Image (tube, helix red, strand yellow):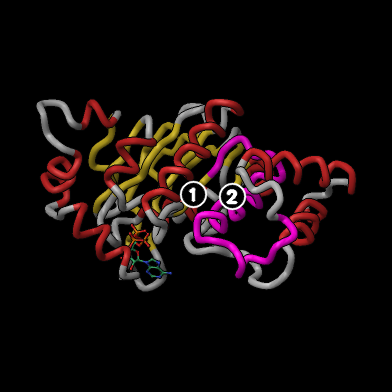
Amino acid sequence: MSIETSGLSKTFKGGVQAVAGVDMTVEPGEIVGFLGPNGAGKTTTMRMLTTLLRPTGGTATVAGHDLVREPAQVRRRIGYVAQGSGLPPVSPLRGELELQGMLYGLGRAEVAGRITDVLARLDLTGLADRAAVTLSGGQRRRFDIAFALLHEPVLLFLDEPTTGLDPQSRAGLWQHIRSLRDERGMTVFLTTHYLDEADALCDRIMIMDGGRIVAEGTPAELKRGGRTLDDVFLDITGRSLREESAMSGQGV
Ligand SMILES: Nc1ncnc2c1ncn2[C@@H]1O[C@H](COP(=O)(O)OP(=O)(O)OP(=O)(O)O)[C@@H](O)[C@H]1O
């Protein structure tokens, strides 16, 4: 199993219970989409699964290792792309990729090979000597992913990977994410506010509300009976996903 959690919870100091007992199973090679209204607890769950936040309750195994007892082993086996680009704006990206590889303890020749490989995989060959400020939004997101793939993780976490991109770049990124799964067997766990993204890209969708998973299934299962995903989301959460994505686009 790529991810298995039982009663995973997080209560912040001050008493906000952001995640209130999440039980989930993600199989190797699945692309799972995590949807939910603003404040549902999606980012908090993802930060726990990536070892960035310590749970206050429950247990989780991520990429074969216990989240709390073996965080270093988990980190070595996962990639994480946070919201917004973390790229340095003005340095040539090849040098930054080399540094990243060295941080993972890779030798010079090995780093060079892996850089060539990830750049080709993400259609970035020829752009590595550029700085981030000279790239389009879609190219920058693909570099964010290239950084997260350098140590060859088996499980990739993406927090709102296509927010702010134009429709063509979004569709291009979906294609890249799909080919990572199809060609490398990568497991992908992503949050999104976009209904069409969840529908087109994800094998399975989990809807979170109030810190709990309130519905899950394949897009086809959730849409059974001729309903749209927006109908399902509205029924469950009392909010429209369209409003949510508009709010997210405004940075609310
Ligand atoms: N560091 C923190 N301290 C206290 N409360 C927090 C902290 N981080 C998040 N919260 C609260 O936890 C709840 C869940 O937040 P979270 O960011 O996980 O939601 P989300 O589903 O990712 O929302 P969005 O779609 O807006 O990104 C919210 O009520 C939020 O205000």
Residue visible at 20% across and 39% down? 229
Asked if residue 166 is among those painted magenta in the image, a careful observer would answer: no
Q: Is 231 left, or right, of 46 in this rendering?
A: left
Label disc, if present, on residue 150 of the rendered structure: none
The picture quadrant where one finds residue 38 is bottom left
Q: Nearer the viewer, residue 211 or 185?
A: 185
Can residue 71 be seen at all in this image of the molecule?
Answer: no
Pinpoint residue 84: horizontal percent, then vertical percent: 49, 64
Q: Is 218 left, or right, of 233 in this rendering?
A: right
- Quick one: label 2, few (<14), some, or many (20+) residues within 10 Å? many
The residue where tag 1 is placed is 158
Residue visible at 82% across and 46% down? 111
Mark closest to the chain's N terminus, 2 or 1: 2
**Disc nearest the viewer among 2 and 1:** 2
Q: Quadrant of the C terminus?
A: bottom left
Q: Please report contact status of discs 2 and 1: CB closer than 8 Å, yes or no.
A: yes
Task: Please determine whether, in this image, residue 246 is positioned above or below residue 68.
Answer: below
Magenta stretch bounds: 128-156
Q: Is label 2 in a helix, a strand or a loop?
A: helix
Label disc, if present, on residue 145 of the rendered structure: 2
Asked if residue 132 is among those painted magenta in the image, a careful observer would answer: yes
Type of the residue with mark 1? Leu
- Quick one: label 1, few (<14), some, or many (20+) residues within 10 Å? many
Question: Which quarter is ligand 1 in?
Answer: bottom left
Q: Is 51 left, or right, of 189 in this rendering?
A: right
Task: Please determine whether, in this image, residue 83 is positioned above or below residue 111.
Answer: below
